[in-house]
Image (spheres, coloured by chain):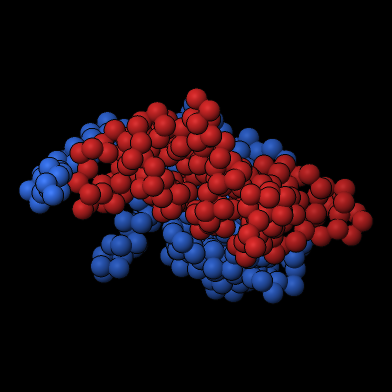
Amino acid sequence: MMEKRTDKNSYTILFAVGMVLVVGSLLAFLAGFLKPTIEENKRLEKQQNILYTMGVNNNEAGSAVFVSTDEAPALFGKYITKQLIIENEDVREDDKAYLIDVKKEQTRAKDGKTRRLPLFVGEKDGDTFYIAPIRGKGLWDAIWGYVAMDENMVIKGVYFDHKGETPGLGANIKQRYFMDDFTGEHLLRESGEFVGITVSKSNADPVNEDKKDYEIDAIAGATITGDGVSAMIKKDLRLYVPYFKKLKK
Amino acid sequence: MAKDSKLILDPLTDNNPITIQVLGICSALAITAELEASIVMSISVLFVMGVGNVVISLMRNIIPSKIRIIAQLIVVATLVIIVDQVLKAYAYELSKTLGAFVGLIITNCIIMGRFEAFALGNGPWRSFLDGIGNALGYAIILIIVGFFRELLGSGTLLGIEILGDPVAKTGLYAYGYENNGFMLLSPMALIVVGIIIWVQRSRNKALIED
């Protein structure tokens, strides 16, 4: 039987090389072409997230809605009065602080270097908001968020997001019924000791009246995502405690 | 022409990819907790299957048989990355809702199954119809499962409260109705798919085995 042309080893190898080259260059070209647009989207999203925690949003009953991407830069300039980078004892202003990649900073910290901590100071209706980004692990992938606090580290608003948590379960950390529970919760004890907040299944306070129990009612079926939220709050916000201590003095 | 329409209609009922061929079960279980996610996944798969089947069909005479599976995989992966990147650039909100699903499309066995079983041996137009048909058959089941899981599990449809507010105890909840949290977990999707298979098999004589 005649061997088909496409069965030859040489053809197979040529085909494989050719296909990889075509597909590779196609995707590289596409990625290069779309990169600026994607980066811009991410930048605006960060501004929307930060504004959201300050209550600058278009929330409807029950659902979280950001200000539009067109308005975001102007509102960001209006409400965010200072952007700080905290590096050990050193605090300096930098209006690009919101572009700091928390993931990269966490890796730097692991390598023994100092982590740069961004903190955004916002003013709205005479109130001051201190907004810190946090990042951690959920069940499937990364989860992150922004926490707005007052000078006593009492939470004034949060926004959480995730890369790939389960729809209907872990993905609901970005739903208002979960996020709104954090508002008013204390992170510090009276003595000034940092406790953080635990997303708890055995929370005795499901309607969330006690704002000093350091607990939030968990989402049923989303244990690991909830644990991830507790962990990132405890781990990342703890780093800001020295700054807030200095602030009170 | 009659044969062409069969390519679309068969996978909807008698040869449904999920309930009869039992393909694509993994994603049917994983993402059907909400109706919106089911619909979005259906549309994504529709696109990838339609285009993918045509691409594979056009390449069917030049793909070496020894590496055909790898070639198919590259086609799916490329399409999925293109979809992902374009959404991220021009429909950022939507791409966030899609999140993990875009990646999950690659693992959908219906796609590889149809490439292998159909597109490699048929022309582009028939392959396109076959892709669309199978994707629609997949979509129907996904949407049915998503509908029941979201309604019974969360009391909502597309995020809108249908049965009342469970916290304020309005609507059905005023009479002591509770959401069944179990519906949100994957095992219940398997049971819902099972019930669909049961109903379908008991009504369709062609599918009844001795």
Residue sticking out furthest to the front? A1
Q: Residue at x 59, y 68 (%)?
A: A223
Image position of A202 with respect to A146: above or below = below
Residue B44: image x %, image y %? 48, 39
Looking at the colours in the rendered structure, which chain would you say is drawn in red?
B
- Could one spot residue B80 in this view of the protein? no
Q: Colour of chain A?
A: blue
Out of B58 and A90, give the one closest to the viewer.
B58
Tell me where residue B162 sits by quadrant. top right
Out of B79 and A214, give the one closest to the viewer.
B79
Image position of A163 with respect to B10: above or below = below
| For residue B144, side relative to residue A99 (left or right) | right
Tell me where residue A97 sits by quadrant. top left
Out of B163 and B78, give the one closest to the viewer.
B78
| For residue A27, side relative to residue B107 (left or right) | left
Residue A232: image x %, image y %? 48, 64
The number of numbered badges drawn on the structure is 0
Q: Residue at x 69, y 64 (%)?
A: B182
Q: Residue at x 59, y 53 (%)?
A: B19
Tell me where residue A42 sits by quadrant. top left
Residue A92: image x %, image y %? 34, 50
| For residue A25, side relative to residue A93 (left or right) | left
Residue B209: image x %, image y %? 63, 59
- Could one spot residue A199 in this view of the protein? yes
Residue sticking out furthest to the left? A10
